[in-house]
Image (cartoon, helix red, strand yellow):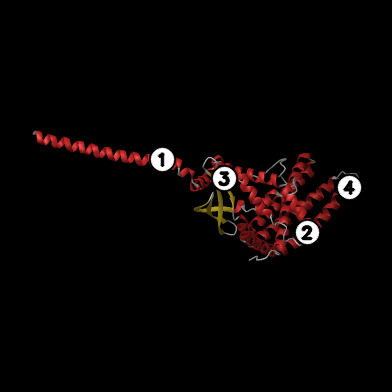
Amino acid sequence: MNDLEWKRILANRKSKRRYEGIIVLFLFSVFVASFVWYLFIYTKTPEYALKETYGAMKNGDFATFSRFVNLPTLTDNAYDDLTVDLFAYDSTLTDSTKVLFEKFYVLIKPELTRGANELIRRRIEEGEWIFPEGTHILKGRSLGIDFPGFMERSQIRNTEIVSLGKVEKRGLAAIAKVTVREKCTDEDFDLELVMEETPSGEWQIAYIKNYKDYLNRIAPLQNRDIASYIDSTKGIVDEYNEYFADFQARFKNLMWTYDGNLREEQREEIAALIIDEVIPALKRRQQKLDDIPIPPGAAYLSRLRQQSTENTIKTWHHFVKALRENSPAEFAAAESLKKKEIETDLRIEDIIKHTAISKNIPNVP
């Protein structure tokens, strides 16, 4: 190989190394620019906050969720939207009574919003809607309100995210559109989430701008279905209410004693009434209710009726066992289940009353 050829090879190698160096420098520059853009620009955008919020909800990451959602502010505003006209169309209430109810809902707002925040936290972390138990103030009606029923009206448990839409900046705030679906009625709706910039430069979801509009869209559809379901099951309910009224009268007569102590034959007669007549009637009633087509919006009411029947039957079984064995533990179990049954029955009554009142609301489809 002569000198000329050798110089040409060296020149080609040098040129190739220079070219490769330029490519490496270019790729490195792109990487650094992308990293800087992602870390210092994109992570400070409302789009990033929205995406991270959605990911946190799917992954059970409440820490990230609370970083990008101002949950106390969100539930505070949602509470106002939910209760603003709760009694507006109840013609059975006087104006002064409506004012008292409105003041009551203002008074209990801190407890209910805290309860809602805790419910959401546990839903994200544990994947389930876990309501207060034990001696919690929101258990049962200790606060004068049925918390599970209240949350059901909020539609939170029935709403799922379909897709994330565009984000539009408006001055110091941003509006993110999110398409959601109410699962009972299969109704889609575009929620508008108001986002605000934090002192650190990140963005947070502050409140739902059109949450009231969403409630106004969904509630009439559900009320229509519930009213239809109540009408179609009225005959069954009325028929069996007569049976149960007769059972109740017979039960009271059988339970009567001179000294508060039941005789052995009384215990067996009471047990026979429950096992042979009351429980079979409960099962027949529930079967007839189950045979009635359930409109989508009435699914919750239907489930409550099933739960009521199940709890009632379990209560009677424990009561019968307590009678036959004279067992305080079984009496206590029956009493505990009876409380659950009463809670469920009151919830059913609330829904039926609310649906009747809702017929006065204008523009119900």
- Determine the CA span between mark 3 and mark 1: 25 Å
Q: Which mark is residue 257?
A: 4
| Residue 328, image x, y percentages | 79, 39
Residue with the mark numbered 3: 69
Indicate the quadrant where residue 81 lies.
Answer: bottom right
Badge 3 or badge 1: first in the primary sequence:
1
Mark 3 residue element: loop
Label 2 or label 4, whichever lies nearer to me, is 2
Q: Of 111 and 203, which appears nearest the observer? A: 203
- Eyeballing the image, is 159 above or below 126? below
Q: Which mark is residue 35?
A: 1
Q: Earlier in the sequence, mark 2 or mark 4?
A: 2
Q: Residues within 10 Å of mark 4 (few under 14, many from 20)?
A: few
| Residue 95 - label | 2
Which sits earlier in the primary sequence, circle 2 or circle 3? 3
Please identify the quadrant where the N terminus is shown. top left
- Residues packed near mark 2 inside 10 Å, few (<14), some (14 to 19) or many (20 plus): few
